[in-house]
Amino acid sequence: MNSKQNRISEISHIIKSEVVRSQQDIISRLSERGIEVTQASLSRYLKEIQASRIPDGVGGYIYKLPDETEMTQGAGIASEIISVEFVGQSIVVIRTGGGYANAVSALIDSHNLSQFAGTVSGDDTIIIVIRDGYSRKQVKEKLIFEFPYIKEKFINE
């Protein structure tokens, strides 16, 4: 296993087996195992494995990896999408339950949709910028094709 694969494997193991509240927690645990990683590299690895911070139920957040169902269908976070709304011709706003915007955004980003220039997520809101040349109808159809569970979540279409 090469260094990157080893680091990613260790990061995944740490998130699955321990309560991890911050990137610094992960860096510390890796260091205890003799693995040095920068915060920038860790951020890239977390995105690659689709780790996200979700509410822990007691006012904080923990890191979590998607399970196989979430990876293939997004079913684990489907219930957290509250609405999908177009704003003008080039922006989509997705509202989620508190703390779930990052997980939903990571799922969307993992599909590498050519219609989107990028996503920005906060705590409960995601903004998606649509690339020039794509209509709202095309974007809506693509979103529904990729994420069928959001079909009923559109509020102004």
Image (cartoon, rainbow, N blue to C red):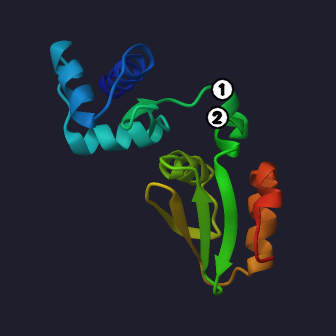
Which x, y percent locates residue 26? Answer: 27, 27
Q: Is residue 5 visible?
A: yes
Q: Mark 1: give few (<14), some (14-19) or many (20+) Cα within 10 Å.
A: few
Disc assigned to residue 71: 2
Q: Is residue 83 above or below residue 60?
A: below
Q: Is residue 109 above or below residue 51?
A: below
Q: Is residue 52 visible?
A: no
The answer to whether mark 2 and mark 1 are in CB contact below 8 A is yes
| Residue drawn at x 45%, y 18% as measured from the top left | 16
| Residue drawn at x 54%, y 53% as measured from the top left | 105
Relative horizontal placement of residue 146, taking residue 117 as reference (left or right): right
Query: Disc 1 marks which amino acid?
Result: Glu
Q: Nearer the viewer, residue 101 or 134?
A: 101
Query: Disc 2 marks which amino acid?
Result: Met
| Residue drawn at x 38%, y 38% as measured from the top left | 59
The residue that label 1 is drawn on is 68
Cα separation between marks 2 and 1: 5 Å
Q: Quadrant of the C terminus?
A: bottom right
Which x, y percent locates residue 71? Answer: 64, 34
Relative horizontal placement of residue 53, taking residue 101 as reference (left or right): left
